[in-house]
Amino acid sequence: MDGFWFGAFPYIALTLFVVGTIYRYKVGFKYSSLSSQFLESSHFQKGSVPFHVGILVVFFAHLIALLFPNISFGGHMLVSMETLMLSFSLIAFVGLAILFYRRITNQRVLMVTNKMDIAIEVLLLIQFFIGIYITVSLKWGSAWYASDMVPYLQSVFTFHPDVVAISASPLLIKLHVVFAFLIVLLIPFSRLVHFLVAPLHYITRPYQIVRWNWNPKTIRDPNTPWKDAVQRPKNN
Amino acid sequence: MNIRSQMSMVFHLDKCLGCHTCTVACKNIWTDRKGAEYMWFNNVETKPGTGYPTKWEDQELYKGGWEKKGNSIELKGAGKLKGLLNIFHNPNLPVIDDYYEPFTYKYLNLIESPQSDVQPVARAVSLITGKPLDIKMGPNWDDDLSGTPDYARKDPNLAKLTPAEQEAMFQLEQMAFYYLPRICNHCLNPACVASCPSGAIYKRGEDGVVLIDQNVCKAWRMCITACPYKKTYYNWSTGKSEKCLLCFPRIEVGEAPACMHSCVGRIRYLGVLLYDADKIEAYASADEKDLISSQLDIYLDPFDPKVIAEAKANGIADSTIKAAQASPIYKFVKEWKIALPLHAEFRTLPNLFYVPPMLPVMATISQNTNDNDTLHEKAKAWDDSWLYDTSLDEIFGNIENMRFPLKYMASLFGAGDEKLMAEKLKKLMAIRIYRRHITVGDISKEKSDAALAEVGLDIPMAEAIYKMTSLAKFDDRFVIPAAHREEAIEMLESTADVKGNTGFGWTPKPARGI
């Protein structure tokens, strides 16, 4: 079984993620955060802000540890990292719980809810719960993550899956990994795609946008040769 | 100079009868869909009143538009920093209840309910949840309800009036109202475009229509906050924002937008204005007292040979320049100077101008004695001896004492400048005095000439204004330049390249199979 879940399943998930997100982006219209704040705002605020902040911190902590496993903590630093991560996961978990409660109790929000929304929220709730439980029961994850988990994850991302590296891990950790890849798999089929189009380019673009169907200067200039006139207009 | 052309509009408020034909025409074409039921790209409000969404003019509440910071301007409730920080929850977003929950009635109950002792009823049900609904708000909920405490007195523009002035305005015998039709202003400095984190909203270079690219919109919902006129709407079903598109598919083939075409009062005018795009930022950051005059400065004289040469160099078609010369908007805004933008203090440089209303604010009637020698023959024959009276001893005596305080009107159309407001109203009044002299005859020529002279109008100009407001035909009201789609297609692909291909659309070269 380990062979499938840790040798094959990550690649199924990653392939579907890459192909699915690109295909969905090409189709275009369905890429949206599908915000329901317009229908209900106050519970949304209480849930959405802590959830998003929490999950971003936790996600980047996992990512940084994966990329730089040699950073080691000791003493005070280890305790504070542990506390920090635990509190952000708790913040995200509570936020998500509020969002989930809002989604299934608010009549208006329920009308814009589909089965995948419920599935993905339940899955994330379970994943957070497992993660928090691991942090509490198997202490000092900030220390053993680098030595015990990173080798397996790196083997997956370098296309030499080392199933043995994870087979000795406790069941909870195994579940956490499988659920993580399941969530990755579901990204292109759910509203989760919106994090891929986070509007960071807004920071550098000018405020006003003007789009031209064609370049009016070249088209009406009789000196423009035919082949140069055929050009996509430069916007702004 | 960077000359561009802009589709602009004038709404003549004296002629608006509040029939909502524009609204219905627009609704039927564009927003009769799931998620868009509550949207009104065109709506007609009763003023004084709270409008739609409720109290939209109160930017302390909705944080729309731009505000001046130092020598520059910033978005009040959105922008790069505020927008990205508030992306997980936008605290300045209006919610559906600020508009109203869309509803329908269970009409089928009326014919399908079983026999019983009581009449069947068609209950209201929400178009969002499908559940029965107690209607608290609806489209045009405050229509004609000016003077009632719930609506007129909550008009944000009244904040600037003293309590005594407000009381004077609402005395029952003085109660008056007028209609304010609103569509997207297709601004020169659009706040919605600037606020969109995805960059989905853009201004079309060719005609200045502001549009939302539905494929790029990701529902970050900042445009709804940023537009001070609340003319971008969030479709709660598709998760995309939508707005008035000035019926661009109609404009491109030379037809007037649906709201304008269907206008029963013929209050709407559409035409092209040439403007200098390099000056937008400077003029949008002008001091509040100079805002309107600087906005009117940005529009250029299409008869000026220098402007024509610059426009041609910038690729503006001859047909567009010709349309700009015949534009009714240019006449109203620049030549006659009787149309003003709505709430210029939002600093978006709106391109929809309003000729302020006089009828509800000026009307007094007096009984006419038919033996009056000065009366026109036609007027003597009228059965009704009551006349709409503007013939005071002092020509403009009642402008300052009108039923709506100047301060109120100036808050809407003059960015708070009462002098400017009085000037426009006096002009409109002078034309009435002049026409009354011609048609009724109880105002002397001296008095009529004096009225025109005081506001700087001559008789040909007064006659032209009268003709454009009262007698204008379809082609006078809508001067729409060719969109030159035929040139557009040549720019997007060389037509020679597709010679020998098959059909339209996806055009593979016919080739022999293997």
Image (cartoon, coloured by chain):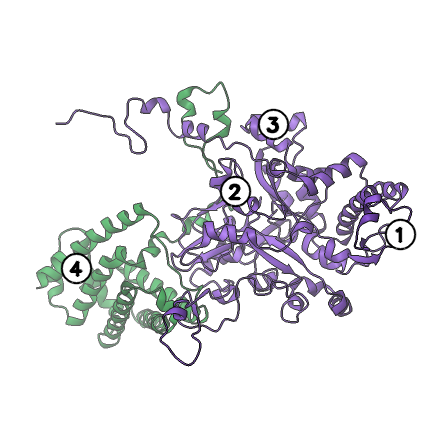
Chain colours: A green, B purple
Give the residue number, with chain letter if any, for mark 4: A152
Looking at the rendered structure, whether the residues under marks 3 and 4 are on a common chain is answered as no
Q: Earlier in the sequence, mark 1 or mark 3?
A: 3
- Name the mark nearer the viewer: 1 or 3: 1
Q: Position of residue B333 (x, y in %)?
A: 68, 41
Quadrant where the image shows the C terminus of chain B: top left
- B292 and B128: which is toward the camera: B128
Give the residue number, with chain letter if any, for mark 3: B310
Give the residue number, with chain letter if any, for mark 2: B209
Chain at numbered mark 1: B
- Name the mark nearer the viewer: 2 or 1: 1
Residue flagged by tag 1: what amino acid is it?
Glu
Looking at the rendered structure, whether the residues under marks 1 and 3 are on a common chain is answered as yes
- B245 and A177: which is toward the camera: B245
Q: Earlier in the sequence, mark 2 or mark 1?
A: 2
Residue flagged by tag 2: what amino acid is it?
Val
Task: Please tell me whether residue B283 is drawn above or below residue B51 in the rendered image.
Answer: above
Q: CA distance from mark 3 to mark 4?
A: 67 Å
